[in-house]
Amino acid sequence: MAAGRFGTFSIVAYDRDSASWGVAVQSKFIAVGSVVPWAEAGVGAIATQADANVAYGPEGLRRLRDGASASDVVRVLTEADPGRDERQLGVVDAKGGAAAHTGAKCLEWAGHEVGNGFACQGNILFGPAVVRSMARAYETTPGDLLDRLLAALSAGQREGGDRRGMQSAALLIVRAHAGYGHEGDRWVDLRVDDHPSPIEELKRIVKLYDLTILEREDPATLVPIEGELALSLQHDLAVLGYYSGRFTGSWDEPSRDAFVRFLHEHNFENKERADGKVWPSIVAYLREQAAAETARRTRTAPIVPGALSRGPGAQPKGASASPEKPTAKRTKSR
């Protein structure tokens, strides 16, 4: 079966300050993240699109790993490909060298712009302003590679993006030992496979991922847990069922234990601290969750007596706070 031709705009980039490589992409094509972006820490990043030749991804990374430059990879891959006139390709190498290819038969508008450490490319676009605005946004947006790649996608869409519309988007950023638990190199690997506003949905997911997994907040924003803040946290933890003590404003051991359990159950282990301080983002998230729980109780009729007053963090009835592990394997009943 012949491969489908699809319109796409993307950016490949290298950030020297953090030694990170990334790809961001949007398309009127389902699950574009499964086709276009390829990246490897210490090696480079590749976007293969239009009548995409997915072999460009692994083969291009192999050549980059062997020391080839971005321009060499683009030249070798396209010269060996009979379908090169219908392909589009963007590559950035280990040193930040960038190159791109737009085949003569790619559907209009199609083209690319190569800059210092990045390449923007797109096909079936509203016009050249799409890739031009992506490049300017990437060059002028403050922040790290994540911020700049998202800014480039948004800028391209503001200029019309894929002229057929929107469907999917993806963001891939790699950095040595930056994966979950500092294993692997996938610092950010997020996809929106089918959505009417995929870039905005991608931003929403990035915001939650940033809060939960990444460590990008400025330590200068940390605040001590005391006084009114401690009182507020005790109240919100109580609403959610994690805290059952008095609202004293004193950050005592029961309060700390309740807060730690909340952090762990909501996947915020990386935001746990032992210095009596808290990230403002966690305070805001806890406040939002408590407000949502309060609203739920006012809207929902109780099914089980007392269920609505307990909160989702409350221990199940009859359970201890730290259940003992079974000492022997249980046999199945027949």
Image (cartoon, rainbow, N blue to C red):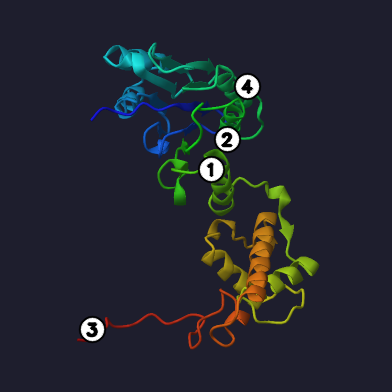
| Crowd tier of the residue under label 3, counting other residues whose Cα lies within 10 Å: few below 14, some 14–19, many 20 or above | few
Marks 1 & 4, CB-CB < 8 Å contact: no
2 or 3: tag closer to the N-terminus: 2
Q: Is residue 271 above or below residue 237?
A: above
Residues 36 and 179: in front is 36
Residue 142 point in image, percent of width and height? 67, 31
Q: Amino acid at mark 4?
A: Arg
Q: Is residue 80 left or right of residue 6?
A: left
- Mark 2 to mark 3: distance in Å? 53 Å
Please name the residue that numbered disc 2 is placed on.
150
Q: Is residue 157 above or below residue 208?
A: above
Residues 200 and 218: in front is 200
Residues 34 and 184: in front is 34
Please name the residue that numbered disc 4 is placed on.
136
| Crowd tier of the residue under label 2, counting other residues whose Cα lies within 10 Å: few below 14, some 14–19, many 20 or above | many
Q: Is residue 192 above or below residue 77?
A: below
- Mark 1 to mark 3: distance in Å? 46 Å
Marks 4 & 3, CB-CB < 8 Å contact: no
- Mark 2 to mark 4: distance in Å? 13 Å
Q: Is residue 208 above or below residue 33?
A: below
| Crowd tier of the residue under label 1, counting other residues whose Cα lies within 10 Å: few below 14, some 14–19, many 20 or above | many
Marks 1 & 2, CB-CB < 8 Å contact: yes
Please name the residue that numbered disc 3 is placed on.
331
